[in-house]
Amino acid sequence: MKNKIVYLTGLLGLWLLTALPTQAQNLALGKTATASSANQPASRAIDGDGNTRWESASNDNQQFTVDLGSVQTIDRVRLSWENAYGKDFTVQVSSNNTSWTTVATVTGNATTYNDFTNLATSGRYVKMVGTARATSYGYSLYEFEVFGTSPGPGSNLALGKTAVASSDQGGFEPAKAFDANNTSRWGSTYNDNQWLYVDLGRTANITQVNLIWEIAYGKDFRLEVSSDATNWTTAKTIINTTSHVNELALSASGRYVRMFGLTRNTGYGFSLYEMQVLGSYVAPLPVELTAFQATAAGAAVDLTWRTATEKNNVGFEVERSANGEAFAKLARLDGAGTSQTPRSYRYRDAAPLGGVSYYRLRQVDADGTAHYSPVQTVTRTAPAAIAAYPNPTANLAIIAWPPTEAVATRWLLTNAMGQPVGTAVLAAPGNFTLDLSAYKAGTYYLTVFAGEQVLGRTKVQKVQ
């Protein structure tokens, strides 16, 4: 069967998660299943193993039924499809396997994950009636799950927030794992040891993290939290899972939450439809930040922010990062101490990076404690847009840029963490060949300098 793979960018808010109960018992697990046809046995869709599946014959009109053994309260039905998913189908329930009630109707489905909640019904039999396939193959279900209860109305603190990943494929950016859309997703490169984190905006007490995977799910992974996106604490480790959905209860605190994928289950990358973070924010910060913006202004970047009130505020440190992971201090501005008067601040980064830059504020209290603002991103067009081809590449990439008055003098290569991994002086001012054969597979950022001026910057993907 064929494959497919998600991303997102959030903005700010102020210097803010409620809980959703952990997953209830799957009433269909291990029960009796029947199907109109079976190229793969029907029982494999109710065995709790995300590596096995039921597959029908290659025809549109097919059915799959599970017998719960007795009449049960049914409030949630969840379908985890292989890539041969149902395009048009209904979900039906019955108490006698004769008279059926339709509880969900789907047309034009475009995802391998369907979750029907708050059904408020009952029955002994639950059936998927397929009327149109999405592919030329049969209907193919990894898991058909039935629950007596639905998740509570929790707040997803990660929704729409800023996301950063160790790598991504074109079109499957990090932000798409935080957009509440199960037809979009973040997808990493085809390597183990890949990660995705979200900035919640400020510290939260985290009670649950939900991971909704595309078929390329993580076999082994960690959930980690951090206060600064640099020092991480492991909150939970999952080993040898076969589930396409992980609803994981936690007891942790942090501003940043990361899924660190250790081992993939497939030859593809890690691929997440959604990463949800549930819980509640801690008490408000002593400084009420009402706005923070970073805007490209010609050859510079202007940062502006406003406060409504301040308490014991020593000052703000402006920090910048090339990748959202490793931040460096640019400047420090004095705060107002204690004030009930709205105040405005401004700082100009006169020598910004080319390409995408990440900015944040580090607010320092009189007692030495510090808090971070939401991260803002700015994309600048470099004076000369450099390009790498082929990209991705297994070893050599030609680096080129249009004619410019500035003369390129050297290049610098950093990894996804912003750490320098290679540099060289350019003997000639024009194009050159970058040799990545000695580097591990992954995402790298190449910066070309003309003296101390950034001539251009581009992302280079190294493959096996």
Image (cartoon, grey):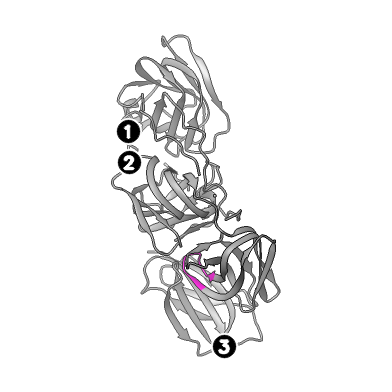
Vertical position of residue 302 compared to residue 371: above or below: below
Query: Residue 202 or 241: which is nearer the viewer?
Result: 202
Residues at marks 3 and 2 touching, judged by CB atoms closer than 8 Å: no
Which amino acid lies under the numbered mark 2 shown in the image of this protein? Answer: Thr
* Disc with the residue nearer the chain's start (3 vs 2): 2
- Choose top left, top right, bottom left or bottom right for residue 289: bottom right
Q: Secondary structure at mark 2?
A: loop
Q: Relative to 68, is 275 on the left or the right?
A: right
Image x and y of residue 167, in percent? 46, 60
* Disc with the residue nearer the chain's start (1 vs 3): 1
**Furthest residue toward bottom:** 427
Which amino acid lies under the numbered mark 1 shown in the image of this protein? Answer: Gly
Q: Secondary structure at mark 1?
A: loop
Chain part drawn in magenta: 320-328
Query: Can residue 390 be seen in this snapshot?
Result: no
In the image, which disc is placed on residue 451?
Answer: 3
Is residue 322 covered in magenta?
A: yes
Q: Secondary structure at mark 3?
A: loop
How crowded pointer 1 is (Cα within 10 Å; few <14, some 14-19, many 20+) is rated as many
Image x and y of residue 84, in percent? 45, 36
How crowded pointer 2 is (Cα within 10 Å; few <14, some 14-19, many 20+) is rated as some
Distance from label 3 to label 2 (Cα)? Answer: 52 Å
Which amino acid lies under the numbered mark 3 shown in the image of this protein? Answer: Gly
Query: Residue 5 or 253: which is nearer the viewer?
Result: 253
Residue that carries the numbered disc 1 in the rendered image: 48
Image x and y of residue 4, in percent? 47, 46
Q: Relative to 1, is 400 on the left or the right?
A: right
Quadrant (top left/top right/bottom left/bottom right) for the N terminus:
top left
